[in-house]
Amino acid sequence: MPIEQRGVDTIPDGERTSGPRDLVSILIGSNLCLGVIVFGWLPVSFGLGWWESVSAVVAGTVLGTALTAPLALVSLRTGTNLSTSSGAQFGVRGRLVGSVVGLLLSLGYTALTIWIGGDVMVGTLHRLIGLPAGALSYGLVYALLAAATVIGAVFGYRVLLRLSRVLAFGMTALLILGVIAYAPDFTTSALPGAGGYLLGSFWPTWLLALVAAGLSGPIAFITLLGDYTRYVSPARHSSRAVLGAAWTGLLAGLLIPQLFGTFTAYAARAPWSTRAGSSTPPPPGTWCRCCSPPPPGRWATRA
């Protein structure tokens, strides 16, 4: 497979062979990972109950999707990414703001992917084959995941789309197995380890969870969504179909793993405390008994 040939330039219509179904696949497949699952722990760690946590995640995700999904239509029409497309409104210099925001998002999520994925891989290999959980093991696994991310970026969109198609089915199956594994221990009772509302009362804490766990997910795609829709031809696919695919992909791709994270937090009865003196995340083995690391190259789709 050839490496990615397109940077920020316009994709010729003859190369825009993806469709709304591909958009759904890449949004779901790239989000069914531990990097998104751990966000489902946040409302629980803030001291919210089960239904309070679920409502905060769902409301925030729906609100964020309403703000972000229409941006899919921009790159559908321009054939380039959102940062470059924003030059029509903000000029050549003004569009650099979007480029910097996109770069910071990519770096942050790539670091999160490597960190969480590396911890899980080392923890799993330690339990399966006795791999020493030392600095050398972590360094090698982190380097391996970083190399996989670079390879995914170099080969670009087509490779990511193929991986996402596989992961959308594979990770869904693993999450279902996870639900079955955790179901006997699940409870909606309050978790004493959370320590009460983080901000002292319900509504401030609920709004914090809405932003941190729900709204932040779709907003993270505010500069990235066009990287996928620019490969969709407006001559063959309507704006309504693409917008519907963006809504479906974002909602399903974010709500499924985040609500799974909330579910496992209650099943494991181990909220991740964010109070002073206990800011360490839960051990990797308690995040997910049967989930693989995030897909390589998710947040680096440009060559």
Image (tube, grey):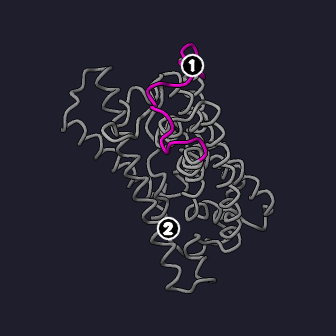
Q: Residue at x 60, y 77 (%)?
A: 86
**Residue 264 magenta:** no
Q: Secondary structure at mark 2?
A: loop
Residue placed most toward the observer, 1 or 239: 239
Residue 106 visible in the shown view: yes
Q: Which residues are magenta?
A: 182-203
Separation of residues labelled 2 and 1 (CA atoms) = 48 Å
**Which x, y percent locates residue 170?**
56, 32
Dot 2 or dot 1, earlier in sequence: 2
Q: Amino acid at mark 2?
A: Gln
Q: Residue at x 44, y 30 (%)?
A: 287
Which image quadrant for residue 104? bottom left
**Residue 193 magenta:** yes
Give left or right: position of 18 versus 34: right
Is 7 rendered above or below residue 48?
A: below
Q: Amino acid at mark 1?
A: Phe
Q: Quadrant of the C terminus?
A: bottom left
**Which x, y percent locates residue 2?**
48, 59
Query: In the rendered image, which residue does mark 2 sit on?
Result: 5
Query: In the rendered image, which residue does mark 1 sit on?
Result: 186
